[in-house]
Image (cartoon, grey):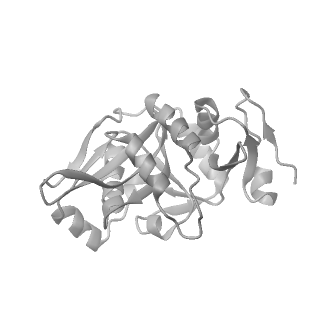
């Protein structure tokens, strides 16, 4: 198949229909990864999956895995952890550390990471612009000092939060961060969380798959709707 090349400064993407039917979801390839390209991609249900030889590869997945915040499911074991384990969950208190830890995570069947320095710089720029957010889970050590134990980051446009990657350095840390973040995001007006791919980890929280065109229709409505409250830099939840 002919893979469309996306020229610099032209942030339009081809419709993903052909890519989903014939190309394994590969929508196009670009040499740029700036904020204009990223925001345009997410608005269309497209995301950068990896880079190779100076090129960035943009994909769509179908059906699309999403989570509706009001339908989040918290299992008994995690609910007990949320009640009894000492922790602090914060938002936007250390974006660089979160994306750096996500890049360092060893993942099955992967020899490296797609979160290269170029990706980290691009999302850091989105963070500076208020479109990328990190959630951090902190556990106290034996001396009572808080240590980063897990978390995740993603992109927010209007009332959609596009999840990107998560990590855990200690048991249940990423689960605690996610379970605390979803109600926080819902309170601020987030109506849809894009999970991109179907995983057992997210299925435990109640993620579901929807038709890609239904997903795009939801994006068209929600991306242009403002939040009811801004996503700040604060403590989201704590048991300390």
How far across and how far down the image is residue 111, in percent?
59, 64
Quadrant (top left, top right, bottom left, bottom right) of the N terminus: bottom right
Q: Is residue 101 above or below residue 208?
A: above
Residue under the point 36% across and 64% down = 73
How far across and how far down the image is residue 69, in percent?
40, 53
How far across and how far down the image is residue 232, in percent?
32, 34
Quarter of the rendering containing residue 229? top left
Q: Is residue 24 above or below residue 191?
A: below
Quarter of the rendering containing residue 226? top left
Number of labelled discs? 0
- In the visual, does 203 lie left or right of 12? left
**Residue furthest to the right:** 1
Asked whether the viewer can see residue 40, the reply is: yes
How far across and how far down the image is residue 213, in percent?
67, 51
Residue under the point 56% across and 62% down = 209
Asked whether the viewer can see residue 165, the reply is: no
Residue under the point 36% across and 33% down = 228
**Residue furthest to the bottom:** 77
């Amino acid at each position: 198949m002919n893979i469309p090349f996306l020229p610099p400064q032209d942030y339009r993407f081809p419709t993903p229909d052909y890519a989903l039917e014939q190309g394994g979801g590969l929508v196009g390839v670009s040499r740029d990864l700036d904020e204009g390209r990223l925001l345009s991609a997410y608005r269309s249900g497209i995301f950068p999956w990896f880079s190779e030889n100076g090129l960035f590869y943009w994909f769509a997945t179908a059906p699309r895995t999403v989570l509706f915040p009001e339908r989040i499911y918290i299992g008994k074991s995690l609910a007990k952890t949320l009640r009894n384990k000492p922790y602090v969950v914060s938002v936007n208190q250390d974006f660089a550390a979160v994306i750096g830890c996500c890049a360092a995570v060893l993942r099955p069947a992967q020899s490296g990471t797609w979160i290269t320095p170029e990706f980290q710089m691009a999302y850091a720029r989105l963070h500076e612009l208020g479109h990328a957010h990190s959630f951090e889970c902190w556990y106290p050590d034996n001396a009572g000092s808080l240590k980063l134990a897990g978390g995740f980051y993603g992109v927010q446009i209007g009332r959609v939060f596009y999840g990107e990657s998560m990590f855990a350095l200690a048991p249940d840390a990423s689960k605690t961060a996610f379970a605390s973040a979803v109600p926080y995001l819902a309170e601020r007006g987030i109506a849809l969380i894009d999970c991109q791919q179907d995983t057992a980890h997210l299925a435990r929280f109640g993620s579901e798959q929807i038709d890609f065109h239904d997903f795009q229709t939801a994006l068209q409505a929600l991306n242009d709707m403002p939040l009811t409250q801004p996503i700040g830099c604060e403590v989201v939840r704590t048991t300390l």
